[in-house]
Amino acid sequence: MVSEFKDKYQLVIIGAGPAGLGAALAAEERGVKDILLLERDYFLGGILPQCIHNGFGLDYFGEELTGPEYAHRFIDRIPESTVQVMDETMVLDITPDKEITALNRHQGVQKIEAKAVLLAMGCRERTREAIKIPGDRTAGVLTAGTAQRYINIEGYLPGRKVIVLGSGDIGLIMARRMTLEGAEVDSVLEIMPYSSGLVRNKVQCLDDFDIPLKLNHTLTRIEGDKRVERVVVSRVNDDLEPVPGSEQTVECDTVLLAVGLIPENELTKQMGIELDPVTGGAVVNEQRETEINGVFACGNVLQVHDLVDYVTEESEIAARAVSEYLSRRRKKRRKKIKLTAGEQITYVVPHRIDYVYQDKDKKTLKLFLRSSVPVEEAELKVVDDRGQELISSRKKIVTPGEMETIILPLQFLDEDIEELTVSVTKASQGAD
Amino acid sequence: MKADIVIIGGGVTGTAVARKLTEYELDIILVEKEADLASGTSKANSGIVHAGYNADPETMKGQLNIQANPLFDKLCSDLNVPFQRTGSLVVGFNQQDLETIKQKKENGDKIGIPGLEIIGRRRLQKIEPHINDRARWALYAPSAGIVSPHELTIALGENAAQNGLQVMLENKVEDIETEKGALKAVVTNRERIECDVVINAAGVYADSIARMAGDEMVIRPRKGEYFIFDREYGDLINHVLFPTPTETSKGILVTATAHGNLLVGPNAYPAGKEDLATTSGGLVEIMKGAVKLIPDLPRGGVISSFAGLRAAAPSEDFIISPSPSVWGFIHAAGIQSPGLTAAPATAERVEQLVKGYYPSERLVKKDDFQETLPEKPHLYDYDEGDLEDWNEYIDRREDYGEVVCRCEHVTRGEIIDALHSPVPAQTLDAIKRRARAGMGRCQGGFCGPRVVEIIAEELGISPREVTKKGPGSEILQEKTKDLRLKKKTADKENRDNQRQEGKYKDPAQDAAKNAEQDAEQATEQAAEQDTEPKTEKQLQQVKIESGGADGE
Amino acid sequence: MEKKEIICISCPLGCRVEVRGDGENIESIEGNQCPQGREYAREEFMNPTRILPTTVRVSGGELPLVSVKTEAPIPRDKIFSAMDQIAQVTVEAPVKLGEVIIEDLVGTGVSLVATRRVLSDKKAADGEKV
């Protein structure tokens, strides 16, 4: 079925999760030939096959799908496409000249040259050690994603009596998963005064099962000889520091950590590409291109998304960009526009707007951003460096846990603009 | 079981002694209570090969440090253990520090430590660009170095095993048998081994072992906590960095590790023998101390933290001597810093003591003693430039082409090698120590499930039997669904029991519950028989036909 | 007369809606800020239902489990007995995407379907997985 692999490709994509798969198929549709998709696991879909819960695809497909179903929509189109897939292959290095060193059982160590590279490596999880929870080093401490892999793919439960640290969606989902499979979940701890997960998940994962959500709490110690035996839970103050005297001991045998995702940019760093310390991903222009011409990034490796639908959208942006790059159809703006995260905004992607668009079918640019705090009756604004407000949109609520988008009509971007600042304020506030 | 010599303890001292003694035609057994070598202090220390200027030549530890340091190049080369003579700097900030530094240099010169120099601010900033710019002087000792302590320990043990050492893991010594004041046997929780000579290298438990032989010994452990930083930061510093020690403390050091991570620590305080927990106060303390030397330490780059116990004797010196109570019993105890550095010399000292118990005809050296370990392939040794050379291993075995640990670049072939090592790895931690899988920034998040699968497959066991560090630390508890099935049976049994004991009071509720149970049971049976589960109506019908609410 | 506080999941506001009623009738719904919220609260009060996503054991497959979900929401209080029934079942590979694994899950009339394909472990003569 698969024709011989080559050592030169027009486009090499690192990672066959939703970002890589979406980009591969979209690039082919746009006429890019010679596409190679590299994947380190033995199946495609990235993290989706283990996300067996619902909530994917409402935006992109207009249907509510589970992770594996969403993945199928892309995976099933690969065999008829011309995209070549090399699975069980680990990329060890990429040079700034776009030479990729990859390793697998059958082809060994190989060097592959690419005209364009798309980085779609996704994320890894923050560990207990990285957040410095003191105590013993025992069996029974693992990140929520690893537990999810064990339960849903490998077929094993990592514990029977669980406490979860982190109330983002993955923490909530895993609390439910463990409970459904017969484990006992003591509680979900959240250091912030609010949960960053969807309300729906709080209701359907915790309330449905009477699992308490303890806001303003964290784990301050893990104890046990060979395995977790108990943990110490403390309340935290406004500075997120444990309050002395508030410690409570909880007996359990498993600690699940859902304390953040980190874009896996080791290869990106090896290439010397600048990363945004806030997103953890590469600094990119609106084409999702990094500082190296022809090296693009999309999906979770660029910014941690909460909806896979946006990942797919981003992969299509990147695919279009790759095809424009390869066919040399890009025209640079005279002055690049810098996008700045303003009041109550944590970050904006893309970081720059570099090109001019003349295609009739491209009239707008979407900005992806997150607020730094929850704001009700929110007003999202984009203001240029002359103080002119380009866009203003109202939202009932914006929260850090839900990525926001702003659609920017390209006609508003005249030649002289050099900076755009995005901000969010409560509607009654702010100068008018 | 019989042997000539039994070594108690699989740390660096025990394994170094084992390697030395396997040079002879003697039957030697090493017993270790944990599931692997290097499970105690030897895996949780600074990994420093000390230059020796601190050494007091009147002390055993001082003498052995001085003797052993020069041996490391050949030793690590023979055993393929990563070792770098980076040199060390004792950093001073003020006049008082300078006085102390001068004293150290004097001491070192007297003993003959090579190349000691006191360097000034400008040179210091040049050779250590990230050092605190208030640092004014440093004692530079070029002969100090860094080594991977767990790899050294395991390599010593495996080389000894190659040369005939029998390693018995998960064997905890419970008794020492003597007869007429002479050693008779060592009794563990699994075996009784008759032997002539015992080496007590039992680390923090050396005193318990000593007491079994009737000797007085006290070991009071002192805990030290550490941070390890991402390999990304390993080239922040070029030497082992020490603060100027004060009366009370050696100080918290900053060093690169032999694999290019950054290591920070240790603090020091008394602790129990099983207390390896890190503490929030302790971690804050070591970070503070490290930042004094390297102000731009990347605090967000911590990938791991751990604690180790120094097996400190009240004399604060090593106890390497024959037992006064039992003939044939030798102590190699009280090993704290510079225990790792001293190990090869400690082994020679113990060898001398062993000679005291054997007539020279018994002490014949093997003529086929292999002093080198065959080199084990490691993908992480290959740089971008020479990665293609790795293909020669893949040609031999495809397993070297499958990367399992993404962070440290470890292949399936290397993990399988670890499982079949001369002292084989059987647990996740043992594999980590031999192959580095799980030592990276994701701390086994990605490779964990894969390594568990490989261990299960290679050892022919269920994944549920795979442990982190021996029995009691199984990674996986149940096959998915089994807990659900057990719970259901348990719940049903509970309800049955409670019903029999008359705990349910509402007969209507009872009937409803029974109906539900019957429905569930019918569903079960249907599922088991692979027929379609019935609808509620059909189940009602079944129940009525079988004679009412209480029928089963 | 029952009073329940229901958190609406229709949007991130998460309005707390108070519903008063008994098993048959709703007397009042208060606290919602939009009509979707009112509708959701009504449903949730009268007949809370959930889609159940889980896994089912597979024999002879390239993977030991197949991910599944109920085709439609089922009553919330049937979830655990559904999980118990599902725990009993082992399906044989190959499993097709969308294949019905259990037809009438604990008498709800709702089917449990596969949300992915699982190929069988055996390879056909030409080396392709079946």
Image: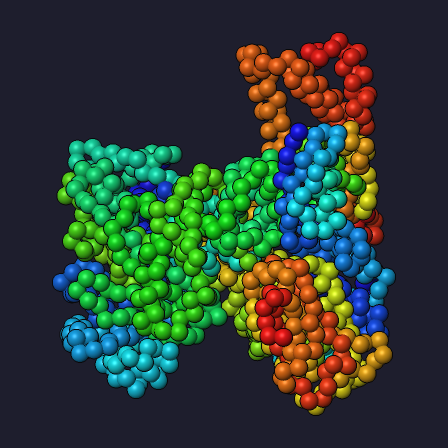
The total number of labels drawn is: 0
- Vertical side of C105 occupied by A168: above or below: below
Is residue A37 among what the camera can see? no
Q: Nearer the viewer, residue B146 or A315?
A: A315
Residue B328 position in % (x across, y down):
21, 43
Task: Report which quarter residue B144 is drawn in.
Answer: bottom left
A330 with respect to B38 (left or right) = right
Quadrant containing the N terminus of chain B is top left
* Residue drawn where x is 42% and y is 59% of the image: A239
- Vertical side of B487 occupied by B342: above or below: below
A287 with respect to B289 (left or right) = right
Residue B360 position in % (x across, y down):
23, 51
Is residue B64 among what the camera can see? yes
Q: Which of B440 and B144 is in front in this view?
A: B440
- Vertical side of B372 occupied by A249: above or below: above
* Residue drawn where x is 78% and y is 28% of the image: C107
* Residue drawn where x is 17% and y is 36% of the image: B181
B108 with respect to A430 (left or right) = left
* Protein image colouring: rainbow
Task: Report which quarter residue B184 is drawn in.
Answer: top left
A114 with respect to B154 (left or right) = right
Q: Which of B123 and A362 is in front in this view?
A: A362
* Residue drawn where x is 66% and y is 75% of the image: A382
Task: Report which quarter residue B535 is drawn in.
Answer: top right
Residue B338 position in % (x across, y down):
26, 61
Residue A310 position in % (x across, y down):
71, 63
Quadrant containing the C terminus of chain B is top right
